[in-house]
Amino acid sequence: MEWFTASDYWLTRLVFQRALAAVYLVAFLTAALQFRALIGRRGMLPVPEYVERVPFKRAPSLFQLHYSDRFFALCAWAGCAVSAALLAGLDSLLPLWGGMLLWLVPWVLYLSIVNVGQTWYSFGWESLLLEVGFLAVFLGNDEVAPPLVVLFLLRWILFRVEFGAGLIKMRGDACWRRLTCLDHHHETQPMPGPLSWFFHHLPRPLHRVEVAANHVTQLVVPFALFTPQPVATGAAALMIVTQLWLVLSGNFAWLNWITIVLALSAVRFPGDAPDVPDAPLWYVVLVLAVSALLAGLSLRPVRNMLSRHQVMNRSFDPLHLVNTYGAFGSVSRVRYEVVVEGTTDEVPRADSDWREYEFKGKPGDPRRWPRQFAPYHLRLDWLMWFAALSPAYADPWFGRLVERLLENDRDTLKLLRRSPFPPDEPPRFVRARLFRYRCTTWRELRETGACWDRTYVREYLPPTRLAGTVHRP
């Protein structure tokens, strides 16, 4: 069935599958290490409370059927184990149907996590991993050559990721059209990386070149994905270079890495294809049926992409099979950060001994240089960026974060870099204040050693204590 398969893409499939398994592994590891404080039974947004009000058909998940912290941990660590097995190539040692079932396991497990993850799992890279992971089930293993239609659908996802992001920028903030967005973005992005300070201080003409190159990569180059080789490989290579540039400039979880994985599916690597038998009929029928389903589900994302009222990062079905993507339709000009502090003083005063909690990734101490965490995702740090932009966004969970800090909750403190209080001496009061942060200049960096300068703006949360506690003045 030469019309159905593309034998010269066998090495492409191998590279793509192993890279995708690595992204899966990071995603499951992130879930396993953070879930208790975020969505566990005593988390800030507990899964049991969520599944009580949201029916299965709206959010299909194994945790709709049963939830306990132990069961969630089992699923998350099982996802790590299966991802590691796929990374090692176990699917190639199984019969075709066995390899497909093995790839189905991480998709089902991660879908179950995302569909109960609420705000913590509301980002586009979650749906993107699920959409790509679902297609990977039908890509086959060493028993068959890669199906041409699945390779095409992977390029279709990549096209929507890049072109959708390009459109949302051109329709959104005027600074994208004026080529000035990068005058601010590296300073105000959700979680800066170790090189973000240097990217911010690049000459402004170079920032204009960066934006212009981004527009070309996202609005022109994607069409070349559907041209003959080697043009399609060249287009994919340009996208990979662009994504690596973003990897260097910030911490965007695995968004850049899953996009690179997608781009690898369009690269035709040299090498002689092994001899494999024709694809069995049941496999051909199944792949074509699934492809037809995904083509039909693509109508809503396409309509959204072409609409003047385009929205970004939206799932149109509860299984996240076909989604719409986009990022940074608007760029903040000013960076705000919520600084959380606690005190053991009996009465909280302005001159009390307020000690600052240190987060792992988000800016805090002006002298502490940002670190590289991506592709690992620090979910609390990301949400703290949104909390600074809009207190209403943080209403569902910020109060519980403060409660857990007042309790010196072990799982919550694991999300932080450092607590200023020993385990047996929790704070009596916790407060939050809003600061404006800006990157220091070269001169300020030399004189003070600080990469940030911060200025107090206002009170974000007044001194708060646990309900029922009594403190004598």
Image (tube, grey):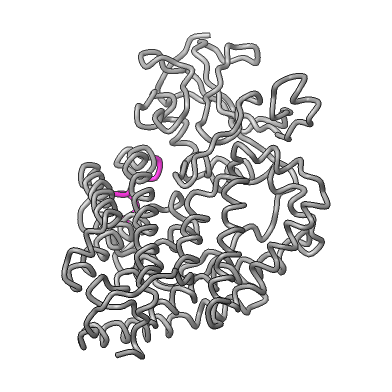
Left or right: residue 412 versus residue 330 is left
Tell me how many marks there are. 0
Residue 231 seen anywhere in this rendered image of the structure? yes
Is 45 included in the stretch rendered in magenta?
yes
Q: Position of residue 17 (x, y in %)?
A: 35, 63
Q: Residue at x 78, y 30 (%)?
A: 442
Left or right: residue 159 versus residue 153 is right
Span highlighted in magenta in the image = 44-52
Between 100 and 175, the residue placed more toward the observer is 100
Is 103 included in the stretch rendered in magenta?
no
> Eyeballing the image, is 456 above or below 146?
above
Q: Position of residue 259 (x, y in %)?
A: 50, 61
Query: Which quarter of the image is occupied by the N terminus?
Result: bottom left
> Eyeballing the image, is 205 above or below 137?
above
Q: Main secondary structure of the magenta part?
A: helix
Between 406 and 82, the residue placed more toward the observer is 82
Q: Residue at x 77, y 52 (%)?
A: 207
Left or right: residue 80 versus residue 321 is left
Between 99 and 324, the residue placed more toward the observer is 99
Residue 138 seen anywhere in this rendered image of the structure? no
Q: Which residue is drawn at 73% across and 28% down?
A: 453
Q: Residue at x 44, y 44 (%)?
A: 376
